Every structure is written in C-alpha cells, then in structure tokens.
Image (cartoon, coloured by chain):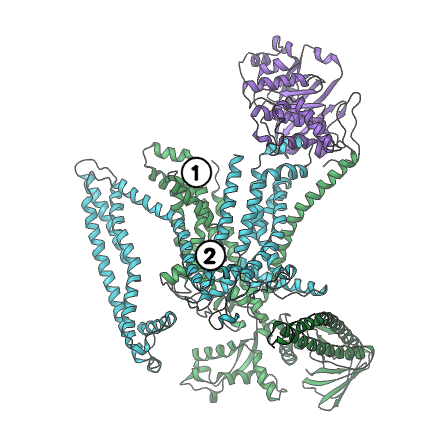
Chain colours: A green, B purple, C cyan
C-alpha cells in the first residue's frame, strides 16, 4: 500500500471534503498490515506443520529401509546335521557357535548365551534354507550374510544412543586390581569425564528436588483436608460404621498422608546423598546404569568398562580381554562415551561392545532392507514387512473400484442426464451430499451389522473391506462424475440428438467418453481416500494379526493403514521405525495416485 | 514502430466542440488528465487521453460498449488498482495534485472521490449501517448522534429519507432497485466527497426510478463534480453539461453537451448520435 | 459360475444379433439395429443368472451348514453364536481336506469329522447343482427372450428401458446405504436400550463397559453413562476447532483476498497435500511426536500432562481440519459478489476493512456452515483420538476446570465405538450393543449438523447467483 507518512495534499480553495486524520489513517494501515500477516501466518502454520510432519516421518522411517548384516563363517558340522532329515538339524547351535567363534574371549555362561541374541532369528532360518537347497554344503565351512537383530540395527543406525569420542592426551598405565583393572593416565584425561558425570548428577538432583517440591504441595493439601474430614466424621458421630463415606474418606486421607510422607523422606535422602557427592568435586564416582556408559579402548581390541572414576584414575572390568598390563602410549588408546544410560536403552553395554568390535573388524554391512517389502507382519520387528498390508490394500481397493466406479458413474449419469426433477431425485441428491459427510466409522458399523452379521460374509476379508470402502467412495465419485458430465457442453448432446440418436445413445456414445477423464480423476481421488481409510476397517475385523500374505478376496487380510495403526501401538523402538517406514510407503502410493490424477487432468484438460 | 506511434497519435486525437467549451470557462477545471493510457496485460484499453472536467457540473461519458469509458472512469478514483494486470500511465490531477503520485494515499483519495456502480450494491446490512459505513471507517463522526445526523442528512440529500425513515434498521438489500441505487448514492455522499463518479447508474433500473435518479443528479450538481458514464444519449443530454464521446479506447470528441448533440464535428460522433452504430 | 455366466451372456448376445441380422436381411425394415437384439437377449439371460449367482451361495451355505451341524452329536452342539463359528471353522477346515496328517486329524472329535465329510459332500453337490441350474435358467431365458424378437420388435427401446432401470437402481444405492446405516444402528440401539435405560445412557456419568463398577450391577455388566464420552468428544472438538477455525478462516481469507495467483498456486497444493494425508498418519504423529513435546513442555512449566492428552489429539486434529475449513470458507468467500467489494473500496476502505466489515458479514451463513461441517468432521474423526487421546473415561464432576482439563487423557465416542467393536465380541452383550448406541448418537448428531450446514450453504449460494 501507499506510504502514508506524507499528509495528503489539501485541496486549494473551497474544499468541502473532510480530510481524514493522519494518525487515524496510520492506525488503519497498521491494522491492514496486521490482518495481512494473520493470513500469511495461517498459511505459514499449515506449511510448517506439513514440513514438520513429513520430515519427522522421514527421519523416523528411514531406518526401516536399512538393514545390517554380519558376515560370519559358519561351520556346517556333520555331527549336528543329518543329511536324511536336514530340516530337523540343530541349526541353532551351528549359528550360535559361528557367532561365539568371533569372541573367544567371552567365557561366562550368561555372556555366551547372550551373544547369539545379536542375530535376528531369521539368521538361523537363512542358514537352514540354504542348506536344504544345497545339501552338499554339509561338512563345509561357508561364509553367510546374516541379519542382525532389530536392536542391533537401531544401535548401528545411531538410533539407540549417541556415541562420543572423548579426546585423550596422556599415556596410560594399566594394572590389575581385583577381578578388574585400574587405569591411570599421565594426562588430565579422566577429570573432564568426572566433571561431566557430576554435572549429570546435578541435573538429576534438581529434578528430584522439583519432585519433592510437588510432593510437599500434595502433603500440604492433604493436611488442609484432614481437619475437614475429621470434622465430618465427628459430625457423623457414633452411628457411623466403618463403611460410612466420611470415615472411608478419612481413612484414605490418612493412608495417602503417610505414603506421601514416606516418599518425601526417600526423595530427601536421595537428594542429600547426591548433593554430598556433587559438592565433593574431586571425589570418585561410581558409574551406575542410570549414568552414561564410558569405555576405555585399549590396543588389540581390549575394552574396559569404567565402573568408578576419580580425578586421575578409573577402575573397571574388561569387556573385551585386555592383552597386557603395563604402559600404553598416548594415541594408542581412546575413551568413548555412550550418552544414553544403559538403564534407558534396550541394548546393553556388552552388546554394544560386541557389535562395535564386529563393526570395527569390517564384518558388518548395511544394505537396503528388501525383506521389508517381501514379508507379511511379524512379532519380530526385524522381519516384519509391509507386503501383507500392500497386497491387502490392493485387493481391497480392487473390490472398491469394481463396485464403486460402475455404480457411481451409473448413478451420476442417471442424476445428471435422465432424472426427472422430482422429490425422489432431490432426496437422492440430499442423501449423496450427506453421505459424503457421514463419519467413516459409521460405515464400519454398517459393514459390521449388515455385511458381517446379516449376510454372514467372511470377517477380516478384503471383500467386505472393499464393499465398505466402496460405499464411502461412492459420493466422491458421483459428485465428481456429475461435475464432469455437466462440463460437457450441451451442443454435443444436441448434435447427437440432432442426427437422430436416442437420448441414451447420445449419452453413452458422445457425452460419456468426453467426460471420462474427469470421471477417472474423481475416481482416483476417491480411491486415494479409500486407501488411507482406517477406522471402518477396524470394525470389520481387519485388525487381526495376520502373518500370511492374503491370496484371495475372502482371505483374512489387513491393509496398509491398519498395519500402521497396529505397529504404532507396539513398544519396540524398531517398530516405531517400521511404522514410519510403512507410512512412507503409504504416502508414496498416495502420491503416485494423486500425481496420476493430476496428469490425467492436465492431459485431457479441455475448455469448451 | 515509429510509424505506428505516429499513426496512433493522429488516430487518437481529440476534437473539442466548440474549441473552447462554455462550461469550462466558468472556473478552473476540477479534474485534468494528460496522456492517460490504460493497459490490461498486453492489451491497450485507453489510448493517450487528455480531458478537463469542470467542478459543480455533470460531465457525461458516452460511447458504445467496450469503448473504455468505464475503464477511464475507474482511473479517477484508482479503482483499477484492484485489478492486478491493469496498468495506468500518464497523469490525472484533481485540484492540481496528481492522484497517481506514489505519496498520495488511495484511501484518502477514494474518500474524496465517491463512486456509484452500474448495479446497486448495498451491503448486506441495515440501511442505517450502509450509510454509516464510510463515516465509521474514516472516523468522521465523533459520537453516535453525530453519526445519525450524517446518515439522516445523506439520506435526505439522496432523496431517500422520506421513504425509509421508519425502517432504518431494515436490510438495505430489501429495498427496490431504484431505492437501492439512491441508498448507494447516499452512502457515497456520507463521506462528503468532492467528486462523485457514476458508472451507468440507471442501467439496471426501470424508467420511473431512472427519472428519480436523474432528478437527484441534477440536484447534486450544485455541490459536487459529477462524472457519469451512460449508455443512453438521452440521459446524457438531459443531465449533463459536458459530454465526451469515446470510441475504441479513444476520446473522440468532447464539448458542451448542447454543441455535441446539435453540431458534432467528428464523423464517428455524428454516426453514433444518429444511431448508426452502438 | 462367473465363467459360465460370462459364456452364456456372450453366446446370447451373438445369438440375438444373428437373429436380428437375419430379420434385416429378410423381408421388411428392422426397427432396431441387430446388435440391440443381441443386447436384449444377453441382458435377459444375464439378469436371472446374476441373481442366481448372488443368492445361491448365501442360501446354499445356510442349508449346508445346517445339515452339517445336524450331524454333530448332542454333546458337540454349539451353545452360542461364538461357539458355532468356532465349530464351523473346524468343519470347514476338515472339509477342505488340507489336513492329511492322520495325527492331526485325530485331534478332532469323531462327530466333527463326520460333519466335515457331510459338509464336503453337500458343498460339492451344491456347486454342481448351481451350474446345472445356471445352464437351465440361462438357456430357458434365452429361448423366452428370442421368442419376442421380430422385425417389429423395438429391441432398442426395451434395452434402453432395462438400462434406465439399472441406472435408477445404482442411484438408489445411496439411499440404500443411508437406510442400511439407519437400520443397523437403530435395531442394535433399541436392543441396547432394552438392557440399559436411555436416561442412564444419556445422563450417567460413569462409563466402564468392560468391568462391573456399580454396586447393584455386580458381575452383570459395566456402567453405561455416556456423559464422560460426550465431554471428551466436546473437549477434543473444541481444541481442534480453536486451531482449525481461525487458521482455516484466515488461510481462506488470505487465499481469496490477498494472495497473488503465484502465491495461490503454491499455497493451494500445500493445503491439498495436508488434506490428503491419511488420518492414521496424523494419529501416529500426534501420539509419537506431538504428545511427548507437549508433555515435556508441560513438565518444564510444572504442569502434569498425561502421555495421551486431549491437547495433542485436539491440536493435530485441528491441523487435519484446516484444509477442509479453508476450502469450504474459500468457496463461500469467493461466492460473495465482487460488486460488494468494489462498493467498499470505492468508499476508501482498506482491504482488511472490506473483508471484516463487508465480505465476512456477507459470507457469514456460509462460514457458519463451514464451521459446522468442520465440527461434524472433528466429532466423527476416529484414528487420531484412538491413537493419541487415550481409552480411559475421564471422571466427570462439577469441577469444570478438572473435567475439561485438556492435559489429561480423555476418551471420545468414536474411540469407544472402535475399541468396543475391535476383536472378538459377543454380539448379544450390552458392551457390544452400547457401541451401536454410541454410533446412533454420532450418526444423528453429525447428520443433523450436516443437513443444516448443507442447506444453509445451498441457500447462501443461491442468494448471490
């Protein structure tokens, strides 16, 4: 708008018009700018949210498309395999010994049992499959690419914890102490770590004292309620039995008060203890599992997990065998921190050390997670795939399309071309508009009551799902088809009628072909909506846990959005990635469909 | 290119009838334009146009449809600003100040140059609110009684007050076409403008309502500079003192109404007035 | 069967066409082209066959199942619908012959195996009988139809009449759907109200369909006071509308009144993309990204926030509705005639004054109905609330701040419908029926809202046409 800093030139001579006050004008323009910004901000908010949503899903979902494998030499021991009944062979033990062979230093029973858990249970299956396919392998040693577990995947993708290398300067001296080691550095390397640990403790103490503060408020509130409750009991007098509400309330108050007091005392003790160790800034600290994990990596793969840290020394146990005690020169040892405390992640310190040693040995390889597209659902995140959902969606959409397109177009043709203007037609029109706005879950109720319970059609099947979605897609298709038919100019109709065609011939031979691109565009949009629909399918049982990929219309099936819903409920972090990955697949299909609709519209756009 | 410009120059020359119109001799002109052109995108709608419009008189723009008379009228209060592809060139001054001056405020300008449209367009509010709209947004009334006075005065000057005084709170859209148009005129004069632009104000009205509006225009002439675009030559002849004839984006001939209608100089004016095209 | 239908129909078409052609080559002028005779015969064959194809499996399945169950000894007779389904599953499995392993076969009782054998026999008999009947009916109707063919026979008119009937039936599907919805919810709702009084449902403040809570109802069923659900629904809807209402409206105003064609061509697709995102994706985002952020924020200012909060669900739902609200408002704002804007500009009003004082008041009915349609959308939305708002019914009291606390988990009508009907259910229990009662409330509430809104919009648009 125009700059209003300059006052308007006042008319010379006999002006009759009122000149608007400049200050007021300024205010009006400010209001104008403000209003414009509101609009822009609204659009900006929508854009920002969209970007946030998509990038969030992208970030969460990308790991689902990546899978890590470890290359292991597997000895297919004849003693464990019977050539006559290969499938009954002890493949578990074969694979277990293959991974254990990589860690000769791991001796304890529990550790040896934990090692195979680094692998996906698919690893055993894979070896079994290959041996069954090629029995001549028995008795040989061969290298296999075996899938790692979902937690190992997440760690290698950096999703479980951050990994820091803490720079070190001094040379290290190692001495055995007890069943562990005591390490001292000539540089001031451990003091920094100690300071960081103290800082962590400080934030924890602050959080605890905040909790204590809240509890104190609760205590005060309870204390304030106590006299009221006591008065009520007194008023109820002696006739009150133990189940009298006033008495019950008082009893509950008393219980609450004492439990709050106990909790407060516990909190106080904890904070005091923390404060004491914080104030002693050089005092040694024990690294519990509630604190970040620190490791010292030594030459020849040795790793010591820090258990206690002082200003100039650490003590800890060897997680990977330490080759030799004595001095280690600066530069040949390092200090690593995993910032997520062990208690807060699903992969423990030992597993991390094993994995990193495999990784550092160059045995781990990451690649595209093809099984994600080749398998159905599973309880195990690393082998759960979207194929079941994709096939289910395809079957369901096919049913939807076959039902809704002919019926929708027929209804549109009737309403637009043949229907007399009477009350019945009007009723149908109002009905269609209303159906378009009926909540989708109500269609689910319809499917449940009519298709499943009344007609007895198979539960969870693509057929019923398709029928329900077809009813939902109908209004969209009818409305779009009518618009497309209306856009065909009357001249075409009249031209056909003019050469003696019947009304139906004119419509089916001339009008309909011209309206087809518009109808198809509307249909694709309707199908895209149906593809993303979830709620009504929950009602007709498509939420069942189904591992098999459906093979027909009456098989139990699930669809992509329902798969997303099911996975989103699972606690494993790996499933979160799978969920986001499945969303990306779904959005990809939606994008393709809409792009096709836009393409159709552009290609056949016609102006009469 | 040069040849085309030359040709344009001769083709778009304006003839004055008579050479010095009588109405212009009564005082300084209110509105003066120099070399005004209008483009819609690549299409030129108005070719360089010079005209002076007298104060306290009615000037009529006539011409066949699409001749640019409405477009030119909309330049005078910069209504063309609302059309993104429209570009206006040249100079238009009101009382000597350029209204396309970047420093000039368009809100201030439109408060001084009111406009009445072809189709009556009362806001979907009460009669009272319709007229009070301008004073309200411009803050012309200090109090409620002030505002009521302005409304009543405006309605009176628009000759509508007697008909609607009992139902000022009724919706403006409920009035008859002629009443609606007078309401729009009342709305325009409520902000006390110098100039009132009227874009075929009677084309949507019946003859009786038309007569009423014409009468009103003649009354308003005493106080305002009125510019009216009209299709009807009779109307131009009845209400205006100055008449300008537009054809294909060119101001062909301008002069005292009487002179134009009795003794047009230009062939095209003659043909149009005789009804040979239009 | 479908193959048979297709073959018969194609044969009928060519037969009719050749008959028609024979007429035309013979004496006299044919009223309709030969292929219309073909269509006529084909349609006359197709219609009874299709009816047969659809009805046969339903009827025969009922008969075959009944016979198979009758074979079962008395001790294996299923007691209720659920058990019946289970037994039928076994019978079907045995009849299909997938199980060949004798060990696994013997796991089933003798009676069930016998029923399986009967089922298999009857089913294959039914299949052959269907094909035989199909052939008979097909040929019979072809003969009947071709009798009508003659030179003077108006085949085209007959065919067109049949077509028109089909078109009318297709249009009636919309009505049938509505009728189906109404009946499916009304019947179950009535059965529900036979068990639980209407007043308790509408005004009760205790919702726990899973467990018995009320003293006088121990063990029989839960409590069905829907007020907490209504409050939860209202709360989420209000939050959503606080987001979608102003933002959608301002976005629409900006698009309609301010944006240059270029800006429009960027902003519109973005809103369309937002509109095209499936609700389950919004739900995921609400539950796993927005809720934790809100929770952390709440904790940092010392508020207690549930991990599933009405606020997270409401905000994300609001964003989901923004495009809906803005495109509806955009429509009505664009329907306000330009002449009104011109009138206002000509008075010296700025754009925002024109919008606020002229355009919006003129478009008010349309905007109100856009708002109503959005409300109905918010009330009926399921996935976002299922995933992000929680399942537990929130305690209701006159402490309004506590009752309408957006930081707590709430449950809504749609969430309850979804959770009550997911998984195996007994169809007779009040728990299942209560979902239909909730569906009834939801359907009629949104229906009334939509009807009013659509009518207001239609009238508004007529006014400025």
Q: In which quarter of the image is residue C69?
A: bottom left
Residue A183 screen position, x and y as percent: 77, 85
Q: Which chain carries label 2?
A: C
Residue A420 screen position, x and y as percent: 37, 38
* Viewer-side residue, C96 vs C30: C96
- Extreme-left residue of the structure: C27
Residue A299 appears in the picture as rendered: no
Residue under label 1: A488
Residue C372 screen position, x and y as percent: 55, 48
Counting other residues with Cα less than 10 Å from the Cα at mark 1, is it few (<14), some (14-19), or many (20 or more)?
some
- Extreme-top residue of the structure: B263
Q: Mark 1 lies on which chain?
A: A
The quadrant of the picture occupied by the C terminus of chain B is top right
The quadrant of the picture occupied by the N terminus of chain B is top right
Specify whether A527 is left or right of B105: left
Q: Nearer the viewer, mark 2 or mark 1?
A: 2
Give the CA separation, mark 2 to mark 1: 41 Å
- Extreme-bottom residue of the structure: A178
Residue C363 appears in the picture as rendered: yes
Residue A176 screen position, x and y as percent: 74, 90
Residue under label 2: C440
* Viewer-side residue, C320 vs A144: C320
Q: Is C179 drawn above or below residue A348 in the view shown? A: above
Q: Do labels 2 and 1 share a chain?
A: no
């Amino acid at each position: 708008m125009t700059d209003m800093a300059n006052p308007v030139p006042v008319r010379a001579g006999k002006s009759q018009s009122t000149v608007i006050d400049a200050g007021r004008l300024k205010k009006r323009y400010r209001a104008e700018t403000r209003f414009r910004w509101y609009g822009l901000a609204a659009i900006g908010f929508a854009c920002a949210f969209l970007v946030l949503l998509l990038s969030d899903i992208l970030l969460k979902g990308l790991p689902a498309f990546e899978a890590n494998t470890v290359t292991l030499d597997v000895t297919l021991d004849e003693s464990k395999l019977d050539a006559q009944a290969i499938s009954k062979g002890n493949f578990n033990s074969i694979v277990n010994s293959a991974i254990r062979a990589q860690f000769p230093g791991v001796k304890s029973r529990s550790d040896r049992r934990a090692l195979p858990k680094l692998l996906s249970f698919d690893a055993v299956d894979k070896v079994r499959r290959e041996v069954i396919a090629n029995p001549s392998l028995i008795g040989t040693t061969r290298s296999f690419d075996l899938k790692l577990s979902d937690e190992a995947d997440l760690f290698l993708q950096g999703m479980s914890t951050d990994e820091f290398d803490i720079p070190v300067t001094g040379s290290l001296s190692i001495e055995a102490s007890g069943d562990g080691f005591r390490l001292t550095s000539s540089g001031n390397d451990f003091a920094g770590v100690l300071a960081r640990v103290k800082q962590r403790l400080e934030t924890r103490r602050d959080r605890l004292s905040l909790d204590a503060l809240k509890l104190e408020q609760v205590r005060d509130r309870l204390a304030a309620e106590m006299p009221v409750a006591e008065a009520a009991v007194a008023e109820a007098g002696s006739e009150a039995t133990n189940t009298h509400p006033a008495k019950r309330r008082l009893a509950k108050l008393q219980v609450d008060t004492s439990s709050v007091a106990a909790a407060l005392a516990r909190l106080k003790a904890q904070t005091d203890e923390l404060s004491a160790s914080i104030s002693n800034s050089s005092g040694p600290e024990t690294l519990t599992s509630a604190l970040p994990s620190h490791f010292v990596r030594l030459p020849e793969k040795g790793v010591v997990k820090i258990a206690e840290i002082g200003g100039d020394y650490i003590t800890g146990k060897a997680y990977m065998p330490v080759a030799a005690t004595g001095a280690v020169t600066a530069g040949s040892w390092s200090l690593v921190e995993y910032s997520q405390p062990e208690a807060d992640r699903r992969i423990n310190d030992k597993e991390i050390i094993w994995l990193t040693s495999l990784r550092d040995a160059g045995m781990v390889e990451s690649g595209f997670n093809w099984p994600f597209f080749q398998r159905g659902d599973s309880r195990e995140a690393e082998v759960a795939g979207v194929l079941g959902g994709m096939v289910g969606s395809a079957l369901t959409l096919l049913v939807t399309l076959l039902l809704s397109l002919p019926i929708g177009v027929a209804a549109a043709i009737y309403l637009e071309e043949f229907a007399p203007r009477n009350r019945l037609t009007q009723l149908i029109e109002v009905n269609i508009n209303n159906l378009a706005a009926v909540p989708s879950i109500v269609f689910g109720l319809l499917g449940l009551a009519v298709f499943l319970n009344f007609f007895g059609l198979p539960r969870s099947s693509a057929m019923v799902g398709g029928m329900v979605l077809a009813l939902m897609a109908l209004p969209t298709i009818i409305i779009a088809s009518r618009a497309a038919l209306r856009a065909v100019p009357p001249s075409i109709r009249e031209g056909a009628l003019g050469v003696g065609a019947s009304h139906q011939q004119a419509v089916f031979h001339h009008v309909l072909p011209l309206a087809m691109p518009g109808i198809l565009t509307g249909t694709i949009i309707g199908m895209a909506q149906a593809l993303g629909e979830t709620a009504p399918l929950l009602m007709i049982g498509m939420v069942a846990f189904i591992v098999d990929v459906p093979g027909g219309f009456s098989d139990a099936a699930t669809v992509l959005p329902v798969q997303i819903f099911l996975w989103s409920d699972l606690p494993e972090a790996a499933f979160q990635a799978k969920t986001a990955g499945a969303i990306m697949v779904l959005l990809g299909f939606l994008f393709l469909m809409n792009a096709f609709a836009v393409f159709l519209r552009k290609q056949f756009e016609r102006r009469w | 290119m040069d040849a085309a410009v030359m040709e344009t120059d001769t083709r778009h020359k304006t003839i004055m009838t008579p050479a010095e119109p009588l109405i212009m001799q009564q005082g300084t002109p209110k509105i003066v334009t120099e070399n005004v052109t209008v483009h819609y995108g690549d299409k030129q709608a108005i070719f360089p146009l010079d005209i002076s419009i007298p104060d306290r008189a009615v000037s009529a723009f006539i011409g066949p449809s699409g001749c640019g008379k409405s477009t030119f009228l909309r330049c005078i209060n910069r209504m063309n600003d609302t059309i993104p592809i429209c570009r206006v060139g040249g100079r238009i001054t009101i009382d000597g100040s350029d209204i396309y001056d970047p420093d000039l405020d368009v809100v201030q300008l439109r408060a001084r140059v009111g406009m009445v449209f072809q189709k009556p367009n009362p806001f979907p509010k009460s009669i009272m609110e319709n007229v009070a709209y301008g004073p309200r947004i411009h803050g012309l009334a200090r109090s409620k009684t002030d505002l009521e006075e302005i409304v009543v005065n405006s309605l009176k000057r628009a000759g509508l007050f007697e008909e609607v005084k009992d139902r000022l709170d009724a919706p403006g859209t409920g009035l008859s076409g002629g009443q609606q148009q007078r309401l729009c005129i009342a709305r325009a004069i409520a902000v006390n403008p110098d100039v009132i632009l009227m874009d075929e104000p009677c084309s949507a009205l019946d003859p009786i309502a038309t007569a009423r509006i014409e009468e009103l225009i003649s009354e308003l002439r005493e106080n305002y500079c009125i510019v009216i675009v009209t299709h009807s030559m009779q109307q131009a002849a009845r209400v205006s003192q100055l008449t300008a004839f537009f054809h294909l984006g060119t101001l062909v001939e301008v002069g005292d109404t009487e002179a134009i209608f009795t003794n047009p100089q230009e062939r095209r004016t003659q043909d149009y007035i005789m009804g040979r095209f239009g | 069967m479908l193959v048979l239908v297709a073959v018969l129909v194609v044969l009928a078409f060519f037969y009719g066409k050749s008959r028609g052609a024979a007429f035309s080559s013979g004496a006299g002028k044919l009223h309709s082209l030969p292929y219309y005779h073909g269509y006529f015969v084909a349609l006359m064959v197709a219609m009874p066959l299709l009816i047969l194809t659809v009805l046969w499996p339903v009827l025969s399945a009922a008969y075959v199942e009944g016979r198979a169950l009758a074979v079962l000894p008395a001790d294996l007779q299923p007691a209720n619908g659920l058990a019946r389904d289970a037994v039928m599953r076994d019978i079907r499995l045995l009849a299909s012959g997938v199980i060949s392993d004798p060990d696994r076969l013997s796991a089933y009782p003798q009676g069930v195996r016998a029923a399986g054998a009967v089922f298999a026999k009857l089913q294959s008999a039914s299949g052959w009988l269907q094909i035989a009947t199909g052939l008979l009916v097909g040929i019979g109707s072809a003969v009947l139809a071709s009798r009508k063919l003659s030179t003077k026979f108006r085949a085209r008119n007959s065919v067109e009449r049949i077509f028109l009937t089909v078109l009318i039936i297709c249009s009636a599907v919309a009505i049938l759907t509505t009728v189906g919805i109404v009946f499916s919810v009304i019947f179950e709702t009535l059965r529900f109200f036979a068990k639980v009084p209407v007043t308790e449902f509408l005004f009760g403040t205790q919702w726990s369909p899973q467990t018995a809570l009320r003293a006088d109802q121990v063990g029989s069923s839960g409590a069905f006071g829907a007020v907490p659900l209504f409050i939860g629904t209202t709360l989420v809807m209000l939050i959503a509308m606080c987001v979608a209402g102003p933002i959608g409206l301002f976005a629409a105003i900006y698009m309609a009144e301010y944006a240059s064609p270029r800006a429009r061509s960027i902003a519109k697709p973005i809103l369309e993309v937002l509109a095209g995102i499936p609700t389950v994706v919004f739900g995921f985002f609400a539950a796993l990204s927005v809720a934790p952020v809100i929770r952390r924020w709440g904790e940092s200012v010392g508020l207690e926030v549930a991990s599933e909060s009405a606020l997270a669900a409401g905000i994300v739902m609001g964003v989901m509705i923004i495009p809906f609200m803005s495109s509806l408002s955009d429509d009505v704002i664009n329907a306000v005639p330009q002449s009104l804007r011109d009138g206002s500009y000509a008075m010296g009003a700025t754009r925002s004054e024109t919008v606020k004082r002229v355009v919006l008041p003129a478009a008010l009915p349309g905007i109100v109905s856009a708002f109503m349609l959005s409300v109905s959308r918010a009330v009926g939305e399921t996935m976002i609330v299922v995933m992000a708002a929680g399942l537990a019914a929130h305690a209701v009291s006159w402490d309004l701040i506590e009752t309408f606390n957006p930081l707590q988990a709430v449950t809504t009508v749609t969430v309850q419908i979804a959770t009550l009907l997911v998984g195996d259910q007994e169809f007779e229990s009040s728990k299942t029926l209560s979902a239909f009662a909730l569906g009834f409330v939801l359907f009629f509430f949104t229906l009334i809202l939509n009807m009013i809104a659509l009518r207001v919009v239609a009238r508004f648009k007529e006014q400025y046409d």
